[in-house]
Image (cartoon, grey):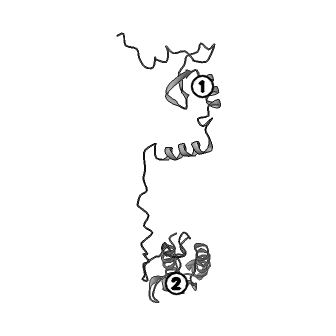
Amino acid sequence: MGEETPHPLPEERLCDWQDCSDAGEHRAPRSPDDLNSYHWFCLDHIRQYNKAWNFYEGMSDEEVEADVRRDTTWNRPSWPFAGERRDVNFRPTGPDIDDYGAFGETFGETPNRTQWRHGPDTPQSKALALFDLTPPLNARDLKSRYKDLVKRHHPDTNGGDKRAEEQFKRIAEAYQTLMAELGD
């Protein structure tokens, strides 16, 4: 019974602001060096205190940077994921290696997904031929060409012609194939 509680109940606490007798319901750290010790303020005074609070006040730019870096790993130690091995001269070769330019001079650049390595009888090549397009290709150009072909071959604009309807279906399928290849 005689034990003292570490934090008095809100109705027992008064605002720590000088000459304020309101209830101290809102806590704020006393200093950047002691974040586990608190002032207790009323709503008006916590707002004033928070406006004036600057955790980094008095720190140099280097100290601020070091604190931010520590904070990114929740103040836990960290190490490089893997050691740097500069003695290895790894250069993969082959037709399907390095699709994203990770091993060549283009490392870091956006991969050109339209440099397809498909033979002449693949669905992608047939779709390109149907659209009368050649790589490099982007989604904007493909969509523009698709709209033109759809308008021209839509069954409603061709009086219900079965050949136009079949061509319209092939155009829609080719469009889906090319969009999937572009990744959009």
Quick one: 164 or 66, which is closer to the camera? 66
In this rendering, the label closer to the viewer, 2 or 1: 1
Counting from the top left corner in percent of width and height, residue 49 is at 62, 27
Residue found at the far front of this picture: 87
Q: Which circle's residue, 2 or 1, is located before the other in the chain? A: 1
Identity of the residue drawn at 54% across and 81% down: 160
Q: Amino acid at mark 2?
A: Gln
Image quarter of the N terminus:
top left
Quick one: 169 or 116, which is closer to the camera? 116
- Looking at the image, residue 108 lies above or below residue 24: below
Quick one: 69 or 114, which is closer to the camera? 69
- Residue density around tag 2, few if under 14, some if 14–19, many if 20 or more, within 10 Å: some
> Dot 2 lies on which element?
helix
Dots 2, 1 in contact, CB < 8 A: no
Identity of the residue drawn at 58% across and 35% down: 55
Quick one: 157 or 137, which is closer to the camera? 137
> Dot 1 lies on which element?
helix
Task: Find disc 2 in the rendering and name its residue.
Answer: 167
Q: Amino acid at mark 1?
A: Ile
Task: Find disc 1 in the rendering and name its residue.
Answer: 46
Counting from the top left corner in percent of width and height, residue 143 is at 59, 74
Identity of the residue drawn at 53% across and 71% down: 107
Counting from the top left corner in percent of width and height, residue 6 is at 43, 19
- Residue density around tag 1, few if under 14, some if 14–19, many if 20 or more, within 10 Å: many
